[in-house]
Image (tube, grey):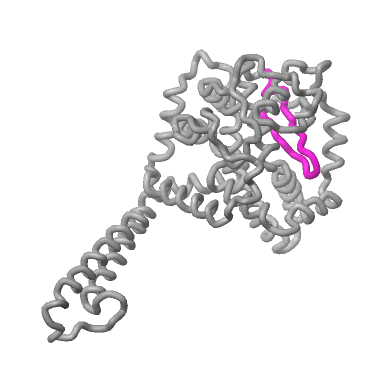
Amino acid sequence: MTGSDQGNVPSRQRKRFPGISSRAYEHPADRSALVALRKLSGFDTVFKALSALLPERSLRLLFLSDSVRVSDAQFSHLNDMLRDACYILDLEKVPPMYVAQDPKPNAMCIGLDEPIIVLTTGLVELLDEEEMRAVVGHEVGHALSGHSVYRTILLFLTGLAVKVAWIPLGNVAIMAIVTALREWFRKSELSADRAGLLVGQDVQASMRGLMKIAGGNHLHEMNVDAFLAQADEYEKAGDLRDSVLKILNVLPRSHPFTTVRAAELKKWSENRDFQRIMDGHYPKRSEDKDTSVTDSFRESAGHYAETVRTSKDPLLKLVGDIAGGAGDLAGDLGGRLRNRFGTGGQGPKKPDAGPDAGPEAGDGGGDAGDAGTAGGQSAG
């Protein structure tokens, strides 16, 4: 942090993560996309050039003129939380934060050159201190990951899509980009939820905050376990028609459904990766430049394969069954071909190959069987 901010320590003892890279908490799909974008030569230059086209200056002036800027003089408790969050995640420059009048609970981190954080009055009035701390950490996580750039572009393109809707086919290309950005942004929200947990270091507060966003300020009427049970019921309920409806319901959204976010965060909080971070073992920002795009995509692909394999959703279970069947079929065909032609592509066996040919052929068949099993497990 800056020199003047070094004395700002968390209000209660929490672990700090010096030099932590956003890769430590990013969702695999979010991380692979960001690593690839960061590796593109001139990517930052191109996006900064868009600042002349996007209404970022207008947004900053709007919040400055028609919202309350958080400081030691205004919403000082939120200012303390913001500096605490930046201290814990070791974000060098504290971004400006505003409170905007809006009864709908919401928060966002936007900006191309520098991120700014906006909280609505509905959110400030809804959450208690520990719940709000997780939300502020969530937004600081967005800032550390660089999500504000893509969020700003998404807001701009969403507005542009409305303006050009009357042009024949003019909306199609823009909506394709918007749909792709929304899919990525939903994953980035899961990443930021994890950052919020690293800042608040209180999983129950994070759960309560998500419940309140879903059901309002009636905590005495709600239960975390029952709320998480809703997520499980949502995932496995219905048939293929319901699976399609789930996809259609989530497409226009920038955020995942609240019960799904709670379940994902609870699962991550019980994961070995989270405990390793809390123990001080995590990727550092100084290592970001050496990050392999291939490894990131491989991890992302592995995550999706595991999701398909373990999902209770009817459509994903069907996809997993089909993939598993295809893997078993490929393995069976591989075994048959190796038994027929031998190993190493040496052609058909000769009838009078002699006594030494038997074990070699048998070994080839065994290898094919192993390959078939491995293929089935990988696809499944």
Give the quarter of the image for residue 69.
top right
Residue 336 location, x and y as percent?
A: 23, 72
| Quadrant location, the C terminus | bottom left
Query: Where's residue 252, x and y in %?
Result: 61, 46
Q: Residue at x 49, y 19 (%)?
A: 222
Relative height, residue 365 to residue 310 (above, below): below
45, 149: nearer the viewer:
45
Task: Answer left or right for 50 relative to 218.
Answer: right
Q: Magenta stretch containing residue 32, yes or no?
A: no
Query: In the rendered view of the protein, which quadrant contains the N terminus?
Result: top right
In reply to whether residue 109 is colored magenta, the answer given is yes
Q: Residue at x 68, y 18 (%)?
A: 125
| Apparent side of residue 184 relative to residue 354 in the rendered image (left or right) | right
Q: Residue at x 29, y 65 (%)?
A: 331
Residue situated in front as seen by the camera: 128 or 306: 306
Rendering coords of residue 113 (x, y %): 80, 43
Farthest front residue?
A: 356
Q: Position of residue 374 (x, y in %)?
A: 31, 58
Q: Is residue 158 above or below residue 11?
A: below
Q: Is residue 259 visible?
A: no
Q: Is residue 250 left or right of residue 4?
A: left
Res 296 visible: yes
Q: Quadrant of residue 107?
A: top right
Where is 260 relative to 171, above or below? above
Instruction: Give the residues in magenta.
Output: 106-125
